[in-house]
Image: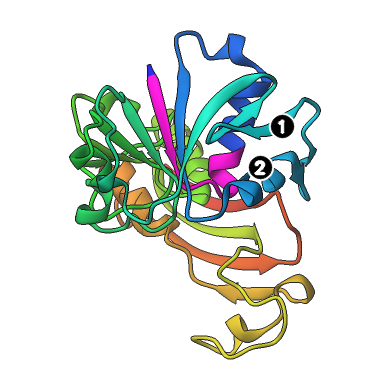
Amino acid sequence: MKLFINGFGRIGRSVLRAWMGAPDLWPGVEVVGINDIAAAEMCAYLFQYDSVFGPWRGSVALAGGCLVVNGRAVPLHRVSDISALDLAGMDVVLECTGRADGREVALRGVRAGARRVLVSGPSAGADVTVVLGANEAVLRDQVVVSNASCTTNALAPLVRLLDEGWGLVTGSMTTIHCYTGSQPTVDAPAADFARSRAAALSMVPTTTSAQRLLDLVLPELAGRIEGSAVRVPTASVSAVDLAVMLE
């Protein structure tokens, strides 16, 4: 299977680290291209030195328009719209830009020649939203698949297990969520007062998309789980606090 990573941010770099770090766990899978609007030198630097996961233990270099990691070369591209690229022969575009909410953007990889697109986050333009351990049985030949959100991936398998084992009547969920790039690092104007606070200094009560996405993943449980979020001053690792009423 040939994979193309579009968007070399936190998720895109983590995918490449996982593949390069343990290729034996990915039999038959090959990352054959990366696209990001950042310069190649910046892509290489951010891959090699990660503030959360630490430095890459192997080698990182640039050569011939490629990012060379542990001696394996992956071509780098720098376009804002991947439909301008020739992706014929690609099996899956991993859409990791965080900007593929609409159908038109999500389909750009297909227009470039790829067979399918896997969106790393929520996408209203997806054919189906899938969480492993919750509803992967719905996968067929859909072209655009969304992997929902990080909170939904933590919540959905647990909710499914509780419902199948004991019958879920209703519930309430709070995600204790690390801060993200959407929050300011210093106090700054935002959509609401809470969101205006410095991310690394504040606990910020806010909304979450997990409730809506859970209804997509497990429609038989639609409307049974209420949800909220608290953004906390940690750079990584989040938690789900779930209280339920069972039959």
Residue at point 47%, 18% (across, down): 30
- Residue 234 visible? The answer is yes
Can you say whether 62 is above or below 42 in the image?
above
Marks 1 & 2, CB-CB < 8 Å contact: yes
Q: Which mark is residue 44?
A: 2
What x and y, as percent, mark residue 162?
A: 47, 36
The residue segment tinted magenta is 2-13
Which amino acid, by three-letter code, is at mark 1?
A: Val
Look at mark 1 in the image and give the residue it sits on: 60
- Residue 135 visible? The answer is no
What colour scheme has been applied to the protein in the rendered image? Answer: rainbow
Whether the magenta-drawn stretch holds residue 44 is answered as no
Can you say whether 72 is above or below 177 in the image?
above
Residue at point 66%, 64% (across, down): 179
Residue at point 58%, 46% (across, down): 40
In what element is the residue under mark 2? helix
Residue 137 appears in which quarter of the rendering? top left
